[in-house]
Image (tube, helix red, strand yellow):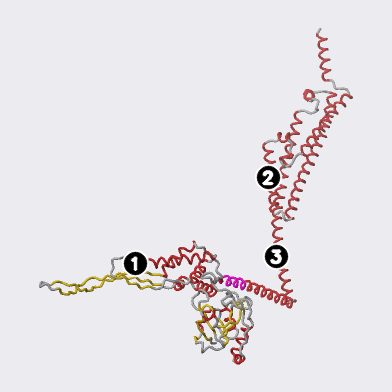
Amino acid sequence: MSNPKLNIKEESSAKKTRSPPKKARVEQSVPRKKKLKTDADKAAERAQHLRFGKAELTPDELSRLSKAQKREMYAAHAARSAVHRDVDQYEDENVGVQALSEGEKAAENVRDISKSRYARKLKKKAKMQDKKGSKTAKSSASEPTAAQDAGASGTGENGSNWLSRWRQKQDIQKSYRAAARSGTAAQTAGGKAASNAAKSGMEQVINKGRSVVSTAVNGIANFAKSNAHVLLIVGVFLLLLLLVMSAFSSCSILFSGTTQVSGQTIYTAEDRDIRGAETDYKKLEKELDKKIKRTPTDLPDYNEYQYHLDPIEHDPWQLTSFLTTLYDDYTRSEVQGKLKETFKKQYKLTTWVEVQIRYKTVWVISPAGIPIPTQVPYEYRIFHTKLVNKGLEVVIREELDNDQWKRYEIFQDTLGGRPYLFKGGLPPGGSDGSGAPGIDYQVPAEALTDSEFATIYKEAQKYVGTPYVWGGSTPETGFDCSGYVCWVYNQNGYNVGRTTANGLWNKCQHISEAEAKPGDLVFFEGTYDTVGKSHVGIYLGNGMMVSAGDPIKYANIHSSYWQKYLSGFGRLSK
């Protein structure tokens, strides 16, 4: 009964250790080779994925990396970023870019070498495993062992056991670390090379720029030496250009100055404001006059009232010229404070009481009953009122500086271009109030025998018939009476400047009508509201003159109009 059991065990043992048929061995070896090729392919794929940028690893591969491997990968990535920063700093230099390219090429070469070495190692290992597998198959066909049984039992469908997989994994990690170290070193070297190359490239550019500038300077110097005449012509041209520009600048200044002077001859305020300010000043004067006249009524307890009064008056042209000088285009309300201030400076009113001891005769009855005249002393009280008119123009002169005073005088000479403002201004026909047309007058031949008068008359005759222009003083602008006379005499060697009729009167030697001769001046006063002489003409003899009426014309100084304003004669001297 035991033999059959033994036979059964032997059969089972024999069956269990029996080598597979040859055909089965061949079929079994094929999957093992396929399994080794599959692992080699996977290892190659892992090697292909070995990069130094985190984004180039697949999520599955990244999850299988250890902390040390990740740190090495991040270090490599940081090294490459540093290289790029250095190169970016000198991005305009081809040297730095080329160095970076060389550094990356070196890193790629390292990776290629690592991959090729790793591939050869895997291929060699696969061949060795294939040889081991064939030997194992041969030995297992003759005599299987317990280790082979264990190996056979541990071999599944994939054709590899856990030991081989562990060795493959260790080999992959070693190759990865070696590649990472090699790539990091290569990129670090490349970054340093890029930085040094970029800096040296900057120095080359600076040196090259210096050499270019030096060459240009030398070229200019050589050109100047060989083309001195050309440079001289260019210099003369530039000098002429500067002179022309300077002339234009001077002309612009001259024109602006002329505009300013002509603007200063005209009152800029409105007529109603000018007349309103004049009315307000007169009102202050009237109130002052009334106050003085009310003194006995306001202060009745005095024996006597004595007055020491300057006239209460002013020149409206002076006031208007003063306000225009200060304020230009003023309004009536704007100058009220200035009017009161000026009024207080012009007029000074003082009062005082004088007490005198006087005697009066009083009849006293004596004890005998006889009336006796007796001198009795008493106080005699006198109330004094004194008004000092300092003069408006004196006040004005104290307030204005030199430049303002010159402007004020211009306004006074021209009456601001508005002679009609006060008391109607000029009568019809300009200053020649007759309004009659110019007389066709022939100067006697004997008068022209005086060469001095002949030259004066020749200049004066040119402008007969020229329209009257208030403030005009040249043939281009037209003439008023004083402008006409000033122009004629200035053209004949007299230095009278530009002044008013009253100004000419002050420059003349005053003579009588009997002493007057052709070429002297004849003056009139009161032809319009102004202080002093208001009109002037050139005396031609025989009671005739030529003056700027409207137009410039001849007139008889003893006509009904001119006779009432005739004021005097004067003689200018060179």
Residues under numbered marks 1 and 3 in contact, where contact means CB atoms less than 8 Å apart: no
The residues bearing labels 3 and 2 have C-alpha atoms spaced at a distance of 38 Å
Residue at point 61%, 72% (across, down): 253
For the point 72% across and 66% down, the residue is 212
Residue 259 falls inside the magenta stretch: yes
**Percent x, y of residue 99:** 74, 52
Helix or strand or loop: what does disc 3 sit on? helix
Q: What element carries label 2?
A: helix
Q: Which of marks 1 and 3 is in front?
A: 1
> Which residue in the protein does label 2 denote?
78
Q: In which quarter of the image is residue 282?
A: bottom left
Instruction: Give the quadrant of the C terminus.
Output: bottom right
* Left or right: where 157 falls relative to 328: right
Which residue does the numbered mark 3 point to in the structure image? 210
Q: Where is residue 513 in the image (x, y as percent from the top left)?
A: 51, 87
> Nearer the viewer's eye, disc 3 or disc 2?
3
The part of the chain drawn in magenta is 253-265
Judge by depth and name the residue closer to the eye, 549 or 266.
549
- Asked whether 267 or 447 is in front, the reply is 447
Q: Is 343 drawn above or below residue 91 in the view shown? A: below
Residue 19, placed above or below residue 487? above
Q: Quadrant of residue 425?
A: bottom right
Nearer mark to the viewer, of 2 and 1:
1
Q: Which amino acid does label 3 sit on?
A: Arg
Q: How far apart are marks 2 and 1 (CA)?
A: 110 Å
Residue at the spot of label 1: 295
Q: Which amino acid does label 2 sit on?
A: Ala
Residue 140, numbered label: none
At x 71%, y 70%, the residue is 217
